[in-house]
Image (cartoon, rainbow, N blue to C red):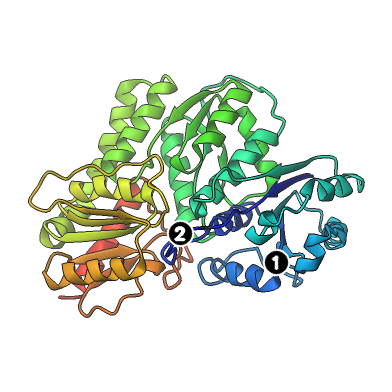
């Protein structure tokens, strides 16, 4: 059993209402490792409020609140007085109670105020070590300007840093994927995992582990069998660390979102795995032919030429920009739900409508921009997560997508990545626009 410590710094954004917090990203990481636990030093109200943004509102199959009534995210309910005097009784009692549930991994976090007042967490860690928890790791963000994507990425990075891997093989037919944003246990993400494995299996490749995919902690250790590590944008540092530790080849890719980017993704991985080029091209050709037969009518009859705005995380935003051009849509606005643009760029469209590109946008500014675009007939469709859909604009076509999605759930597999995912996105776009006619 491993024990990690994650401390949340103060979020200094003036209006982060469109941007989930750093600690929320840590919660999502806990949600994506089914036998992990988080001990949060803070009040129970903060614990409960943040859990509610994931379970059950966004993820109806979340196991954060597992059967038996225990939460996998537990607050110490420590008072300011207890913190100032450095008391650890609450931490120790929770650790002792958790041993009954045989956790695969334990994380520790704290509210910003407890870090600011300078509590000595080394004292807490040493006290836990005496209880035979032989591996305790404290993790501190290096900036106060952090959001949920940073929190999720940090969980994976610290896992990569502190797990002892073995170099099992250099078999490039075995693939590990690091940096998948598994924000819920529903059919969209379950479908993505299946679609990724389906496409790579066509190349004759085996996916040995995906960080993260909702499985138990021990499943993450299978990454050491990989000869190639595919780095997705949600955890670049973790991918670099793992590839270096196990001696695997590192491939940094964008998301396989849309037809072009999925084809490029397959070509990149196939080439690195020494797969015959003719085989790769045959797979792509067959997938595109099947997709064309299904999608060409809704694209040509309804979708092509429509103006669209997208609100969501920057990595999906960049991918959506490329995909929108593929299906003939004109991107009018990109609103990234992040405090910084991180390592992503959305290119200029070079057409009549240059897109509005914003990040860390206040809710008031965001709503005003969307309303003005709609009133000027420059927005036929808004694709957004729940936080960007709190608008009261009549006759605006919308569909909910991304984290969080409070009103849209998937009971069966419905991917949005890969070729199958592209077809599903086109279906949703078609329905959203067509139903407004």
Disc count in the image?
2
Left or right, residue 9 beside residue 356: right
Above or below, comparing residue 79 to residue 214 in the picture:
below
Q: Nearer the viewer, residue 185 or 105?
A: 105
Which quadrant, please, contains the N terminus? top right
Query: For the point 39% across and 57% down, which residue is it?
Result: 337
Query: For the point 72% across and 46% down, which residue is it?
Result: 4
Q: Quadrant of residue 210?
A: top right
Relative image position of residue 162 (x, y in whole percent) = 70, 35
Label 1: how many residues lie within 10 Å, few (<14), some (14-19) or many (20+)? few
Residue that carries the numbered disc 2 in the rendered image: 13
Q: Nearer the viewer, residue 400 or 188?
A: 400
Q: Earlier in the sequence, mark 1 or mark 2?
A: 2
Q: Quadrant of residue 110?
A: bottom right
Left or right, residue 73 beside residue 61: right
Label 2: how many residues lie within 10 Å, few (<14), some (14-19) or many (20+)? some
Residue 345 makes an appearance in the image: yes
**Real-space Cα distance between discs 1 and 2?**
33 Å
Query: For the point 33% across and 40% down, which residue is it?
Result: 262
Left or right, residue 313 beside residue 74: left
> What SS does tag 1 mark?
loop
Residue that carries the numbered disc 1 in the rendered image: 66
Relative image position of residue 361 (x, y in whole percent) = 34, 60
Above or below, comparing residue 163 to residue 400 in the picture:
above
């Amino acid at each position: 059993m491993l024990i990690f410590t994650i401390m949340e710094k103060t979020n200094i954004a003036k209006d982060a209402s469109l941007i989930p917090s750093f600690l929320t990203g840590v919660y999502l990481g806990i949600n994506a490792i089914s036998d992990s636990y988080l001990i949060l030093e803070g009040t129970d109200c903060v614990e409960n409020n943040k859990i509610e943004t994931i379970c059950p509102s966004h993820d109806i199959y979340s196991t954060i609140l597992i059967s038996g009534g225990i939460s996998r995210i537990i607050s110490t309910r420590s008072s300011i007085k207890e913190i100032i005097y450095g008391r650890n009784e609450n931490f120790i009692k929770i650790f002792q109670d958790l041993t009954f549930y045989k956790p695969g991994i334990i994380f520790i976090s704290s509210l910003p105020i407890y870090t600011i007042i300078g509590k000595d967490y080394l004292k807490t860690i040493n006290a836990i070590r005496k209880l035979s928890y032989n591996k305790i790791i404290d993790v501190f963000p290096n900036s106060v300007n952090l959001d949920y994507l940073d929190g999720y990425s940090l969980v994976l990075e610290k896992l990569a840093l502190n797990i002892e891997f073995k170099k099992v093989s250099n078999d490039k037919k075995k693939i590990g994927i690091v940096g998948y944003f598994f924000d819920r246990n529903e059919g969209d993400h379950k479908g993505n995992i299946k679609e990724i494995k389906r496409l790579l299996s066509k190349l004759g490749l085996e996916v040995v582990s995906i960080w993260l995919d909702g499985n138990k902690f021990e499943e993450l250790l299978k990454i050491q069998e990989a000869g190639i590590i595919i780095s997705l944008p949600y955890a670049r540092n973790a991918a670099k660390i793992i590839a270096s530790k196990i001696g695997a080849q590192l491939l940094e890719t964008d998301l396989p979102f849309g037809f072009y980017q999925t084809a490029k993704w397959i070509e990149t991985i196939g080439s690195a795995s020494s797969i015959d080029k003719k085989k790769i091209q045959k797979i792509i050709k067959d997938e595109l032919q099947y997709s064309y037969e299904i999608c060409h009518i809704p694209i040509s009859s309804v979708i092509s030429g429509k103006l669209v705005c997208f609100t969501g995380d920057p990595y999906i935003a960049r991918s959506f920009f490329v995909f929108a051009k593929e299906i003939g849509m004109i991107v009018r606005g990109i609103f990234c739900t992040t405090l910084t643009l991180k390592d992503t760029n959305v290119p200029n469209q070079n057409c009549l409508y240059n897109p509005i590109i914003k990040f860390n946008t206040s809710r008031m500014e965001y709503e005003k921009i969307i309303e003005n675009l709609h009133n000027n007939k420059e927005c036929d469709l808004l694709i957004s997560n729940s936080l960007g859909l709190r608008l009261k604009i009549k006759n605006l076509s919308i569909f909910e997508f991304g984290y969080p999605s409070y009103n849209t759930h998937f009971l069966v597999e419905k991917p949005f990545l890969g070729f199958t995912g592209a077809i599903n996105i086109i279906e949703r776009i078609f329905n959203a626009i067509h139903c407004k006619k």
